[in-house]
Image: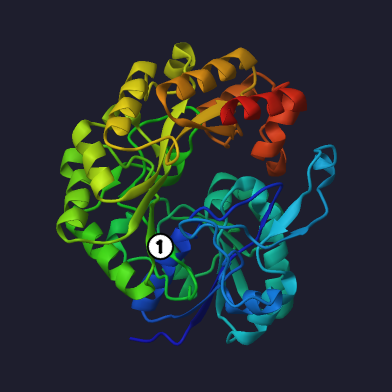
Amino acid sequence: MKTGKKILLVNPWIYDFAAFDMWMKPIGLLYISSFLKSTGYDVSLIDCLDRGDLDLLSFRGLQKRQDKYFGCGNFYREIAEKPQCLADVPRNYCRYGMPPEVFKKKLSSVPKPDFVLVTSVMTYWYPGVQHAIKMIRECFPDTKILLGGIYATLCPEHAAANSGADVIYKGRGLNRLISILNGDLTPDKIESDEWLFAGELPYPDFSDYHNCDYFCIMTSQGCPFNCAYCASGLLDGKYIQRDYNDVLKEIELQIESTGASNLAFYDDALLVNAEGHFEKILDGIIERGIRISLHAPNGLHPRFITENIAEKMKKAKFETLRLSLETSNPERQESTGGKVKSEEYAAAVNILKCAGFTKDNMGTYVFFGIPGQPLSEVEESISFVKAAGSSVNLVEYSPIPGTVMWNELVKNGVIVQDMDPVLQNNSVFFRKFSGITENALQRLKGMSKE
């Protein structure tokens, strides 16, 4: 039954020193799109990061989106003015996504919405949120704007003071959202509805993407581990897995509707309870002859990789694997959560190599830039990963509000609780707080690529 209400969903720009479309879609917003459509709302979507947007392609004089591999590619970008606190960072600060004039054109082409829902991801990307909301406000001055997503959930007070949104919506639940859309507005600037299992919602709505060769899926929500650097528990609450038959149904439907040839798993803990979950999904893909390239960009837990899983992943056509190690230092492994030991990691890499995976499609995340972390620890971790037979994916540490490591850094006076979120940028934090020099960074990058 139609409600008659029009909702505009917006995925704003990225403002950063680097960004790459590695199967990047606002999956939470796409779940909301499906849910609202199923309950009678008229929904429009503007994704500033859609590289295949027809207006963007026309602006650039292109016939189709330009991919590098497996549907991934570079965003259109324009150099932007740096916030003053980032003036000393020796890199160009850019706005990634469609140019503002294209965004303005798209805003003018949609019916006047009753509400605009803006999502957010990295806390330090909030300048993109500000810019998008400012332009939305100019186009629809009387329309209420709600801001949700990760930044809104982790930094609600900052978002309330700086984003320009009328309502900051914390959490993933939708009951309170529907109440707001139905007119139940309160004077409160910050609203919350803490938790909702994505498996209870209609499948994410990819219907607005006309030139995309991938889609994303979540077979589970949350993570049973509580790593000191990770916010999964803050964002998702308890860990829960979907029924594997429902996952297989979604994969087949999304392939049919999108025509995509790549699928990225967004799970934080894809291999937990693998025998009753992930292996069943792999079995279904193999038995049904589903032809699609599979990718796991989020770090897989090495301790759960078995010969059986590795062989099935290879047979199902996994093309991209990322493993979570972070460090080979046993003390730091234990202090950050104890989810992996070096011997478990080495055994997992060996199993994957025996199944036919190589360092060309198998990478391992290694942290650097943690305050107090010796450079030698990073160098030893890089050498350990390379000796095991995996490529190295260096990850600059950045603190996430509310995590164990964030609280420790605040307690020890390294950072302040109300630090500007742009300083949480992974390209910024290590330069300002870890003591690692540019020369040391280049040496680490060189070691990783040798």
The colour style of the image is rainbow
Residue 189 placement (x, y as % from top left): 60, 58
Mark 1 neighbour density, 10 Å: few (under 14) some (14–19) many (20 or more): some
Q: Is 181 drawn above or below residue 5 in the view shown?
A: above
Q: In this view, does 305 lie to the left or right of 155?
A: left
Residue 436 placement (x, y as % from top left): 72, 23
Residue pictured at 81% horizontal, 49% vertical:
82
Q: Is 107 drawn above or below residue 13 in the view shown?
A: below
Q: What residue type is labelled 1?
A: Leu
Tell me the quarter of the picture where residue 367 sits.
top right
Residue pictured at 57% horizontal, 28% vertical:
448
Residue in front for this viewpoint, 179 or 108: 108
Residue that carries the numbered disc 1 in the rendered image? 174
Residue 68 placement (x, y as % from top left): 55, 57
Residue 156 visible? The answer is: yes
The secondary structure type at the circle numbered 1 is loop
Q: Is 250 drawn above or below residue 408 in the view shown?
A: below
Q: Quadrant of the C terminus?
A: top right
